[in-house]
Amino acid sequence: MTVVIGFEGSANKIGIGIIKDGEVLSNPRRTYITPPGQGFMPSDTARHHRAVVLTVLQEALEQAGLKPADVDCVAYTKGPGMGAPLVTVALVARTVAQLWGKPLLGVNHCIGHIEMGRLITKANNPTVLYVSGGNTQVGYRLHRAAWQLFGQISNDPSPGYNIEQMAKKGTQYVELPYTVKGMDVSFSGILSYIEITQHCYNGDELPVALQETVFSMLVEITERAMAHCGSQEVLIVGGVGCNLRLQEMMGVMCKERGAKLFATDERFCIDNGAMIAQAGWEMFRSGQVTELEDSWITQRYRTDEVEVTWRD
């Protein structure tokens, strides 16, 4: 039996989760909420995390029915993410690990999303679409402009969920810039186009257009990745991954290819501590630990920089 506690706080969510051999024992979190369109400043976000992290830690232990002595390893988000929030969570995790006398593990945020999705859905060897505010990738292609689109929408509970609710009110599609080049997508120009032309449309048409256009681009490159890899599974992870319209569009593509679609809901798609605990569980069981002097954070921690020692 191996129990790992995970600390996540790379953006506006602060979450602490506990995993025991593939079972989610607890997963409380808090969200730093700002007015729509303003985003969230790193310093203000870090201040929010510092104010609530100990309360969330107590909740995680109480919900799991565990004491510090029951924990085998402390995992935390090493990156990628916003500098100040990452530092806040890393400091708390380092302190907890030392106070409890437990080994420490720095986890890649993106790997956390993927491992959580694989745990919950039982996907075997999927092509992964990781789609969120700050990091969107199929395989190892990263596209970092999505936040400029969905970040204009409320982050409570997440922009991907909220645009889905807004789009349900619309009935007409408006054509927006659509740019796909091989395995790369470009969101450049979409927000500018919306800002310039929004006076021409009612408020319900643009959410539909934004959602349909961006998701169509993502489905296209995911299908291309499947064709290149001979894959018959797709796993959607990341905060925007809980959007049911995205899952529906991806499901149509998978059905046409005779493939299977795997996805989760907002409990595990949106940033949470359990996903860091699960990735940490896999890493710890394969013999990985992070020495205290190496327990820094890095805002640009690429997915393909991670040495995966727990899978063949």
Image (cartoon, rainbow, N blue to C red):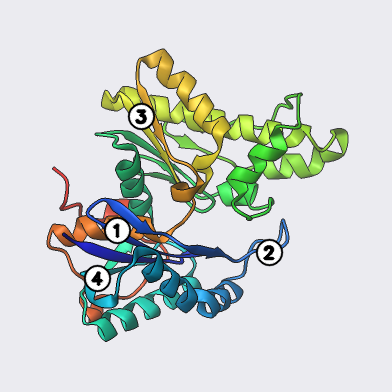
Q: Secondary structure at mark 4?
A: loop
Task: Tell me the residue that label 1 is attached to.
Answer: 19
- As shown in the figure, which amino acid type bears the numbered disc 1? Ile
Q: Residue at x 80, y 42 (%)?
A: 196
Q: As shown in the figure, which amino acid type bears the numbered disc 4?
A: Val
- The quadrant holding residue 71 is bottom left
Task: Kindly report the distance in space between the C-alpha atoms of the residues bearing marks 2 and 1.
Answer: 30 Å
Label ID, residue 34:
2
Q: Return the mark for residue 71.
A: 4
Question: Is the N terminus in the top left, top right, bottom left or bottom right quadrant?
Answer: bottom left
Residue 257's disc number:
none
- Per the image, the residue denoted by label 3 is 225
**Of labels 4 and 3, the one closer to you:** 4
The CA distance from mark 1 to mark 4 is 10 Å
- Mark 4 → mark 3, Cα distance in angstroms: 39 Å
Instruction: Say which residue appears at 49% left-offset and 51% top-offset.
Output: 270
Determine whether the residue tagged by mark 1 lies in a helix, strand or loop: strand
Distance between the Cα atoms at labels 3 and 2?
Answer: 36 Å
Q: Earlier in the sequence, mark 2 or mark 1?
A: 1
Q: Position of residue 280 (x, y in %)?
A: 26, 60
